[in-house]
Image (cartoon, helix red, strand yellow):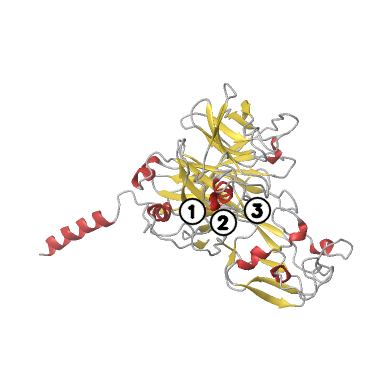
Amino acid sequence: MGRINLIIYVIFLVAVVPANAKTLLSSWSDLTLVGGFTVPPTIIDGYNTRYASGSFDKRPSTNKWIAHHGTSGYIVEYTEPSEPDMTFPTLTVGRYGHPFTTVANMAAMAAQWIDADNVLCSGRLTYSHPGTYNWVSIWNLETGVETLQIVGNVDDTFDWAEGYNYNKLFHLHQALGGGFTRIPSDWAAANNLTGKTVGMTCGGYDALSSPMGPAAGAFAVGDVAPVYLMDYPTSTVSSDGENHYEIRDKNYFFPTYVDGDTASPLCPSGTSYSGCNNPIPIFAGTPNFGVLQDSPRLSGPTGDTGYFLADIVSHGAGWINDSNYKGLAYGIQSPNGYLDYDTQTDTFLVYDPSSFYDGSTAHYLHPTDYAGGPAGSFTNNLYVYDPDCLAQVAAGTIHEWECSPTIITPDFSNLPISTVDRATLPTKIGGVFWDDDRKYLWLILTQMSNGNLYPMLVAYRIQDHHGGMSSGGTCTGSIK
C-alpha cells in the first residue's frame, strides 16, 4: 500500500508542478556583469544621441540593433563590433529613418525589428494633445517608406471620440506607446494570444490620464488594438471608476497650499478647490494620502508604502525567457524628497530646497518655510513582474492593475563609468532588453558621468542560484 501511495504522490507532483517551472528574478545578486557597448554621438540633422529614450531592440540571431536616436525623432540601426566586454566597444552606425513626420506632436520613442529592413515604431504624443490612432507605424530602412497603422478601439462612442484630450484612446497610446518587449511565442500561445508576440511596454506618468505605473500589452502587426496585460489607470479611464497606482517607497512629500493663501492663484480666500490641499490634485487620489505635519504644512503617504506619482518608466522592458528564470523587468526612476508642481520638471522634484525656496523666486508656496527640507535625489530600480500573473490578466480572472512587482535596486559600482544623481538629467535605466540568443539582460543607461553623455548598453548574465523552481502564479510584490 505504501508503494501505491508513493506512485500516486509522484503522479500528483507531475500534474501540479510544471516541468518548466521557473524562478522569478528577485535579487541583484542573481545578475553578473558581462560588459557591454557604448553608443556613439551619431549626429543627425544637428542632433546627437544624448537624449535617446533608451529603447533598443536586437534582431534575433544577428548583431544588429535598432534604437531611438533622441530629440531628432529618428531611429538608428547599430551593429555590434564584437562581443560585449568590459572595454565597452562603440557600436557602429548604420541606416536611419524619420517616422511620424506626418503626425502632429508625435515622435518615434521606440522601435522593434520586424525583419532585416522593416521596423515597427511607436510613440507618445507630447503633453496635452488629443488622442490619435496613428501612434504605430512600419518604417522600411532600405526604401524610407512609412506605413502608418490605425491602432485603437475604433468606434463612434464618446469615450473613444478622437479629439477629446483625456479619453481612452489618449490613455491607450500613452500607456502602450513608446516602448517594446518581445513576448515569448510559447507564452503567447499558452494564453490564447497566439501570434501576439509584440509586447508594448511603457506607461508611467507623462500627462493627466496616463498610467500611474508601468503598462504592458500584447500585439501583432496589423491588429486593431493591443490586449492589455498590465495598466494602472486613474478614475477617468478605469473600468471601475477608481484610481489605481503602482507602489514605490514612501520617500516623498508635498508642500501644500493653504486655503486663502493669496500668493497662490489656485487658492483665493474661501475656495474649496482641491488644489489648495495639494499642488497637483491628481496626487491627492493616491492611497493612504494625508497630512504628515502642519508646520510647514506637508502632505504625503501615511502608510508604510508609497505610490507611483511622477516616476519615470523605461522605454521598453525585458521579458526574461531563461531556462530557470522568468520576469518582465522595467527600469523605474523615482524622485525622493519634495515634489512641487512649480519646478516644472519631469518629476517635479525639488533637488535643492534651500535655493528653490529662497524667497526671491515667484513660487506659489510659502517662500522660505521649506528651505530646510531634505535634499532631493533619484532612485533607479528594476520592477520585475511575474508573467504567470500577467496570464491571469489575459484570461480575465484579475484586473490589469493587480500584478505587483518585486523591486530590485541595482548596484552599478562595478561599471567603469559612474552613475550620477543631479537636479536635471540624472542617470536612469532608459530601457531594458532580454537577449534571447545569449540569455543576457541588457540595461540601457543614459546620462552617465566622466564626460560620457551618451547611452551605454550593459549586459548581465543570470546566475542559477535557485534550481529553477518557483511557486509561480502569485500576484503580490515585495521590495528587495
> Is 88 in front, or is 392?
392
Q: Residue at x 67, y 32 (%)?
A: 40
Q: Is residue 87 visible?
A: no
In the rendered image, which residue does mark 3 sit on? 207
User: Pointer 1 and pointer 2: residues touching (CB < 8 Å)?
Assistant: yes
Classify mark 3: helix, strand or loop.
loop
Real-space Cα separation, disc 1 to disc 2, in angstroms: 9 Å
Instruction: Tell me if 28 is positioned left or right of 262 in this view.
Output: left
**Residue 425 point in image, percent of width and height:** 72, 48
In the rendered image, which residue does mark 1 sit on? 230
**Residue 128 point in image, percent of width and height:** 67, 50
Q: Quadrant of residue 101?
A: top right
Q: Is residue 435 visible?
A: yes
Between discs 2 and 3, the one toward the N terminus = 3
Classify mark 2: helix, strand or loop.
loop
For badge 2, the amino acid type reads Gly
In the rendered image, which residue does mark 2 sit on? 213
Instruction: Tell me if 148 is positioned left or right of 12 in this view.
Output: right
**Residue 141 point in image, percent of width and height:** 57, 25
Crowd class of label 1 (few under 14; some 14 to 19; many from 20; radius 10 Å): many
Real-space Cα separation, disc 3 to disc 1, in angstroms: 18 Å
Is the residue 444 above or below the residue 303 in the image? above
**Residue 387 point in image, percent of width and height:** 42, 51
Q: Quadrant of residue 353?
A: bottom right
